[in-house]
Image (cartoon, rainbow, N blue to C red):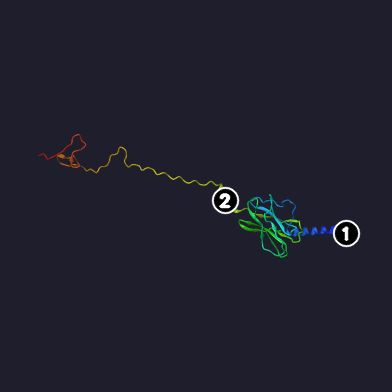
Amino acid sequence: MKRMMLNTNRIAVLAVAALLAVAALLGWSLDQGQPTASAQSGRSESVQVRAQLLESGRIELSLRTRTGDLSPRQRLFPVGTRETGWLVSTPVELPNGAEVLIIARRQADRDLEFGVRTLDPREDYLPRGRVFPASTPVGRRLISTPVRIPAPPAQDDAQQQADEPQPQPEPTPEPEPESSTDDEGGSDETTESVERISGGHRDGLIVENGVLGDPSAPVLISEYGDPF
């Protein structure tokens, strides 16, 4: 009886050891409840895909980040044995602002392949260890190797533009009043004709507008005829 129990325990230990060897070969590790990678300095975010086979036959998916685990609202891969294309979860937002989906597809050998898809821009990131074996027992949770997801490229530009002071419009200059062409104390121009007699006994006399003499003088000189 004791020998039978020893043989049973030995078989169980060998089965666990074989499972660990397969998981290590595929790049997966048992989920120990602690992050296996820290975030890279800068804007990239290190994430890992977590997968667990439920009793219903569906596989529950989630993401591990440096700040904790993220579980999409729709995160259960359906039961089935046939090969499928990529199925996607509902989106989740990473600590660096990137919005991502968990993608998964069943392969021809019934193993599941996982990855992470960014929405802006759309790009698939596949971890090195990303295959969940079909032989994984119910309740066992495995975690993929890390993959780095960059932050949205437009995030910094939009924030920088919002922080930069906007240039103020230049004030419109007010029109200046037109200046007068007449200077103070200046003499007004006149169209009246002013002449001076040259020669004879009237040499030098002013004739203004047909009137002999200066109109502004105290005595107006007029002439009605020539003497002698």
User: Hey, which residue is sitting farthest left in the picture?
Assistant: 228
- Helix, strand or loop at label 2? It is helix
- Residue positioned 59% across, 51% down in the render: 155
Pick the quarter of the image with the N terminus.
bottom right
| Disc 1: which residue | 4
Q: How far is disc 1 from disc 2 in space, using C-alphas?
A: 70 Å
User: Is 114 placed left or right of 207 in the picture?
Assistant: right
Image quadrant in which you'd find residue 107 = bottom right
Callouts 1 and 2 close, C-beta under 8 Å: no
Res. 205 mark:
none
Q: Quadrant of residue 30?
A: bottom right
For the C terminus, which image quadrant? Answer: top left
The answer to which of 56 and 46 lies nearer the viewer is 56
Helix, strand or loop for disc 1: helix
Q: Position of residue 216 (x, y in %)?
A: 21, 36
In the displayed orientation, state which residue is furthest to the top.
218
In the displayed structure, does residue 86 sit left or right of residue 4?
left
Q: Which residue is mark 2?
A: 158
Query: Mark 1 or mark 2, which is nearer to you?
Result: 1
Q: Tell me which amino acid carries mark 2.
A: Ala
Label 1 Cα crowd, 10 Å radius (few <14 / some 14-19 / many 20+): few
Mark 1: amino acid? Met
Residue 224: percent from the left, percent from the top? 13, 40
Could you say which is closer to the camera, residue 114 or residue 89?
89
Does 60 sit above or below residue 172? below
Q: Assess disc 2: are there few (<14), some (14-19) or many (≥20) residues with their C-alpha within 10 Å of its C-alpha.
A: few
**x, y (%) of residue 133?**
74, 61
